[in-house]
Amino acid sequence: MKLKPKLLGIDERLFARVISDWELWACANAYVNRHQEDAPAIAAMRCDELLEEGDIAGVRTFQAIIERIHKLLQRSAAGESVH
């Protein structure tokens, strides 16, 4: 059983890991599938929450996700496949 840092009373920001490009695209795709054209705004709200929490690594991750969301929406608007 893998224990989560929060359960151990450890600040989970100390356990920041590198997110792969594939994972960033998968997150962006999930946001677009769930929220369509509202995806960038909803992801930006999560980014703001992370900033308020002081999670700079999380902010940078969400900035990368938002960038990919915009690219997916541009492809979709141009009629290109996004899957």
Image (cartoon, rainbow, N blue to C red):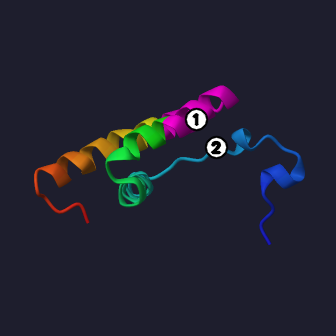
User: Residue 24 in the image: x percent, y percent?
Assistant: 42, 51
Q: Residue furthest bottom?
A: 1
Secondary structure under the numbered disc 2 in the rendered image? loop
Residue 57 badge: 1
Q: Amino acid at mark 2?
A: Ala
User: Residue 69 in the image: x percent, y percent?
Assistant: 33, 46
User: Residue 43 in the image: x percent, y percent?
Assistant: 47, 42
Q: Residues within 10 Å of mark 1 (few under 14, many from 20)?
A: some
Q: Is residue 64 left or right of residue 80?
A: right
The residue depicted at 50 percent of the width and 34 percent of the height is: 60
Magenta residues (range)? 45-62
Instruction: Indicate whether residue 60 is drawn in magenta.
Output: yes
Q: Is residue 45 left or right of residue 35?
A: right
User: Residue 41 in the image: x percent, y percent?
Assistant: 42, 38
Identify the image quadrant of residue 46: top right
The residue depicted at 38 percent of the width and 45 percent of the height is: 38
Q: Amino acid at mark 1?
A: Ala
Q: Contact, CB < 8 Å: mark 1 with mark 2? A: yes
Q: Residues within 10 Å of mark 2 (few under 14, many from 20)?
A: few
Residue 16 badge: 2
Instruction: Indicate whether residue 64 is drawn in magenta.
Output: no
The residue depicted at 60 percent of the width and 28 percent of the height is: 51
Work out which quarter of the rendered image holds the C terminus and state it: bottom left
The residue depicted at 52 percent of the width and 36 percent of the height is: 45
- For the residue pair 75 and 13, the one nearer the viewer reads as 75
Identify the image quadrant of residue 66: top left
> Can you say whether 17 is above or below 45 in the image?
below
Q: Residue furthest right?
A: 9
Residue 46 badge: none
Determine the main secondary structure of the stretch shown in magenta.
helix
